[in-house]
Image (cartoon, helix red, strand yellow):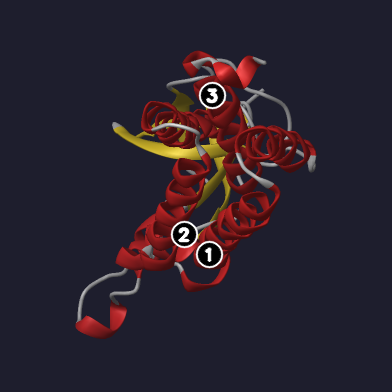
Amino acid sequence: MILNSLIGVFVVTFLAMFFMIGELIVKLKGLGIIIGIGFITFYFIDHATSMNVIMMGFAFFVGLGLIILDGKLLNDGVFGIIGFLVVLISVAFAASTWTHAMYSMSGVILGTFSSFFLIKVLPRRDMWSKITLMDQLTSDKGYNSLNTYYKNLLNQEGETVTILRPSGTVKIDGQEYSAVSISKWIEKGKRIKVVAVDGTKIEVEEEE
């Protein structure tokens, strides 16, 4: 069996977390969660007894639920970290040996971090948005908010620093910003115009 080898354990847990966390942060149309659940179910069934499958599987999905709860509602990172630790512990305790446990945890960690590279090629979901926008809530303290600064970019022109597919980096007045193309992908080095600003989300279109 593939899970009898250390590499097999690593690959299965890596792919499970890559697709499941990937589904949470970008739009994979449900395929990520289906593939991820398939891999992690395969892992638990192969490694654990029938009772441990239920216990460790339940713990795993409780941890995953805490990550989702934090990303969608709480946005403070605490429950997300707790959930991730629960996921790690459940995978480790299901392993047949300590060596297998170490490889399975490595797969979970690297699979999770690798999934964030999907942001560069696929549309991003609205997860942990409050954390990324925390610095904008400053107008009540006597200085301009980040929202106001970004709104001033509306109708300004610039140039793409990277390919927008649909998100990427643009340069406006010598300053680089993350931006999203509202229609087609835009190649690097093309002239763009800011057509909408929502908080720190900048939407652009290519100038003809």
Label pair 2/1, CB-CB below 8 angstroms: yes
Name the amino acid type tagged 3.
Answer: Val
Q: Residue at x 55, y 72 (%)?
A: 73
Q: Quadrant of the N terminus?
A: top right
Find the distance from the CA under tag 3 to the CA under tag 1. Answer: 24 Å
**Foreground mark, 3 or 2?**
3
Task: Give the numbered dot on residue 9.
Answer: 3
User: What label does residue 83 carry, if any?
Assistant: 2
Amino acid type, residue under disc 2 in the picture: Gly
62 left or right, relative to 42: left
Binning the other alpha carbons within 10 Å of mark 1 as few (below 14), some (14 to 19) or many (20 upward) gives: many
- Nearest the viewer among 18 and 164 is 18
Quarter that holds the C terminus:
top right
What residue does disc 1 label? Answer: 66
**Number of numbered discs:** 3
Q: Earlier in the sequence, mark 2 or mark 1?
A: 1
What is the secondary structure assignment of the residue under circle 3? helix
Q: Residue at x 65, y 38 (%)?
A: 40
| Tag 3–tag 2 contact (CB < 8 Å) | no
Residue 149 percent across, percent down from the top left: 35, 59
